[in-house]
Every structure is written in structure tokens, then in C-alpha cells.
Image (cartoon, rainbow, N blue to C red):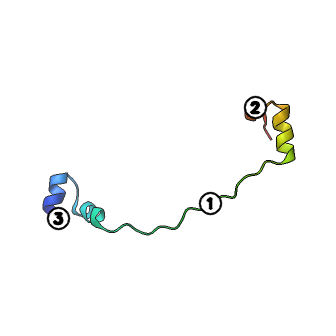
Amino acid sequence: MRTVAGGLGGSERTVWRWLAPPKKSAAPAVRPRYELSETDRDVLAFYRGNVAAYVI
């Protein structure tokens, strides 16, 4: 490990981390799909689709 770490310019701990199996992570949270309400549609139609003009 020392030889490899020295040759790569890193530490022994870094080499061990590279060789370790990947950690299992939890699945990312999925947000529910957003549906436009009638109010949203009316306002967007009023401002001709200009979302920047639609400030709540």
C-alpha cells in the first residue's frame, strides 16, 4: 500500500478507500409529479406563458 500510495501521491487510507467495495446508499426520494391547477393555467394564459411574471 505504501508503494502504491507513494507512487500516486496519496495516502494509504486513500488507496484502501479506492479498493473498498462501494457502500450501499438509500434510493433517492422521488417527489410527486406536479399538476397544474386551473388557477395556474389561467394565470399563465393571462401572462401569455411568461412564468417570470407569475409571482405569488
- Residue 30 got which mark? 1
Residue 10 image position (x, y, % from top left)? 22, 55
Bin the neighbour count of mark 2 within 10 Å (Cα to Cα): few under 14, some 14-19, many 20 and up: few
Asked whether 12 or 34 is in front, the reply is 34
> Are circles 2 and 1 on residues that touch, CB within 8 Å?
no
Asked whether 43 or 53 is in front, the reply is 43
| Tag 2 residue | 50
Find the distance from the CA under tag 3 to the CA under tag 1: 41 Å
Q: Secondary structure at mark 3?
A: loop
Q: Earlier in the sequence, mark 2 or mark 3?
A: 3
Give the residue displayed 70% in from the left and 55% down from the top.
Answer: 33
Q: Earlier in the sequence, mark 2 or mark 1?
A: 1
| Tag 3 residue | 1
Bin the neighbour count of mark 1 within 10 Å (Cα to Cα): few under 14, some 14-19, many 20 and up: few
Q: What amino acid type is highlighted by mark number 3? A: Met
Q: Quadrant of the C terminus?
A: top right
Q: Secondary structure at mark 2?
A: loop
Give the residue displayed 74% in from the left and 35% down from the top.
Answer: 51
Residue 54 image position (x, y, % from top left)? 79, 36
Q: Residue furthest left?
A: 3
- Residue 12 got which mark? none
Give the residue displayed 22% in from the left and 63% down from the top.
Answer: 12
Residue 39 image position (x, y, % from top left)? 86, 44
Find the distance from the CA under tag 2 to the CA under tag 1: 27 Å
Q: Secondary structure at mark 1?
A: loop
Q: What amino acid type is highlighted by mark number 2? A: Asn
> Are circles 2 and 3 on residues that touch, CB within 8 Å?
no
Q: Quadrant of the N terminus?
A: bottom left
Query: Against 11, is 25 above or below?
Result: below
